[in-house]
Image (cartoon, rainbow, N blue to C red):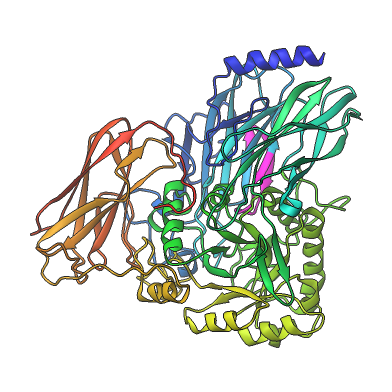
Amino acid sequence: MVLSTLRQFLIGVLALVLVPLTGVSATAANRYRTVTDFDAGWLFNYGDASGASGASYNDSSWRKLSVPHDWSIEGKNPPSNPFSQSAPSTGRGGYLPSGIGWYRKHFSLAGVPAGRRVSLEFDGVMANASVYVNGTLIGTHPYGYTSFRYDITAAAKLGGDNVVAVKTDTTSQPASRYYTGAGIYRDVRLIATDPLHVAQWATRVTTPGNKTVHAETTVVNESGAAASVSVQGVLTDPGGATLPAVTTAAKTIAAGTSATFAYDVPVSNPKLWDLANPNLYSLATNVLVGGTVVDDDITSVGIRTLTFNAATGMSLNGKSVKFQGVALHQDLHGLGMAAPQRAVQRRLAQLKALGVNAIRTAHDPPSPAFLDLTDRMGFLVLDEFFDVWTQHKYSDVGDYATYFNRTATTPTGTPAVPGASGSVPWYQVDATSVITRDRNHPSVAMWSTGNEIRDPIATRTPLLTKMVAIAHALDGRPVTQALFRPGDSGDVTGATRTIVDVFGGNYRPDEVVQAAKASPARAGLFTEMGTDTGAWTTVRNNANITGLFVWTGAAYLGEADGLWPRAEPDFGLMDAVGTVRPIGYSWQRAWSAPTTSPPATGTTASRVLLAPDHSTVSTDTDDVSYVKATVADASGRVVTGSSAPITFTVSGPGVLVAVDSGSPVQETFRGSVRKAYQGVAYGLVRATGAGTITVTASAAGLTLGTTTLTGTTAPFVPCSGNCN
């Protein structure tokens, strides 16, 4: 029976009509389960649509697009300006639109063999996602920042056409203190597995002593009969060499149950993961039945030891290191929340050039794709869960406080909460989701349970205790919290200080130092600080303080109540398109990074100069080239006083994805015109095919600027280490 199933599977792989996934991870591709990129071929409707969940609904007039997609940043009628002073999102949401948006996709599973389990995995949908397959409601997921996976086997038709419909709803506003976007703004994939397979995010990898890769995983049996199962680990080093496979003893797994396996792969000469050399291995955890592989779970592995000590602070592979960190919101300005990986990579590279070695994902979980980049590029990450718990910070009726303690609906689309029986609240589901999904990333250094939580300490203490317990049950990393006025709130002398593993606090460094040194001592962290570089002296002078995170690395949309026509505040070492501000250069010096300088300035504008950040750009939606238009004088010096409207034109196999600048003032990001800000504007270009793409930029009274790009159909491949 097993051999027959395997034979059917192999035949199905050859005939599969869907395109295999090519992600940004350093891992090898799956060989036995099928993981398919599901981003292309969607249809979109702005606003509610009665009956849109149904299989036979007429969607022929809907807009064709690929996800990730953020419909809020573009508005209802692009290129019309989507900003409105009366938007329900208010200035906290960047004065951008909210409401309901629908997505539909027609697809075939003709190449998937009978007997497979088929799932859809969403890395993030903003927000309150309702997923239907062939008219059947599969599940609902409120939190826009956590991933979920739904088994659609019962609703799908393997031999015919299928339709998935996703309703997104951000109607309840204000929904946050900053811009959140809207829609299917992260990647989607379709996964087909044997009934005997590794459970969702079930593999946990550690590297004890940097000489062993230890793996634990859970195999579930969704077939109709018991099976004798073993697990095999195959580790591949950064150079592509495969180490000897390790196979566990077999276990009998009854139908409808699961079993946990553990194994160790010795590594005699490990290539360690660190900030300068982020070496990555790939681990294939194969499920064997009768000696035949029926499923494989692929995990990227960084061999490293990260420790936290009450006296000496943080060490990476035995060497003292401190967080030279910045906090980041997730929007990429004109690209919104649906930023291509090239754009995210560009921002991280710009921050690295300032001396940044750590990112705090303020104030919500990042995408898996973001962590793939931080793994590759050598950053440490403070992975944060929530901005609010049970209490709203303001009158944000649509924020996570609405769902935090609400009983989660099933299926949750996530692994079971450890130790739970019966119903559980959403915060436990989402915390479990973040930890199990992200725990194998070597870049993830710590978990943060929340930011400036305003609940009273009597409410917070049991909730914090539960979240720390979940984290400890699932992972060995320390847990902190970005505490709000810890001395005033009772955290310095109360239970919080000993519940967290590392004492973290915002803007009160003396209170963090006091709490960290109190008995029993623990390491401390300045989880959020202003831009005054004097705080770095305090970090250096206190060995047990593990570092700090500056607010913020780059400018962001939202948090702009009362600032209209501005749609953003004035924070950031860089503006939203990466122009370094004076304070950014100050931190570059404080962190002893190689110094750079702002460009030379001029006074009399005479021409527009064009320069792409990359001269080759792909048709891959993860790729984009930032073409910089500089209003310059006759010597090529930027005229920072110019706000001239720049008109971008693209000819050849390319398309203008967005126009942008560092301006904090509301202005549409779509169309072909953008006012220069401090003499600079950008046209963001993607290829539509192979060949020469010509980009021009014009402004009244100035000499035209022109440049060329080479379009390619090759997939985008993210960089490793120091990037540009």
Q: Eyeballing the image, is 182 above or below 287?
A: below
Q: Is 312 displayed left or right of 169 in the figure? A: right
Residue at 42%, 47% (x, y): give it. 342
548 within the magenta span? no
In front: 390, or 600? 600
Taking the image as drawn, is residue 181 in sight? yes
In front: 454, or 712? 712
In front: 67, or 692? 692
Q: Position of residue 133 (x, y in %)?
A: 64, 31
Residue at 25%, 67% (x, y): give it. 599
Q: Eyeballing the image, is 476 above or below 458?
A: above
Q: Position of residue 217 (x, y in %)?
A: 79, 40
In front: 395, or 707? 707
Q: How many marks?
A: 0
Q: Eyeballing the image, is 109 above or below 650?
A: above
Q: Residue furthest front?
A: 269
Q: Is 270 displayed left or right of 424 in the figure? A: left
Q: Quadrant of residue 451?
A: bottom right
Q: Quadrant of the N terminus?
A: top right
Q: Position of residue 24 (x, y in %)?
A: 52, 41
Q: Quadrant of residue 622?
A: top left
Q: Is 236 displayed left or right of 77 in the figure? A: right
139 within the magenta span? yes
The residue range painted magenta reads: 131-149
Taking the image as drawn, is residue 570 in sight? no
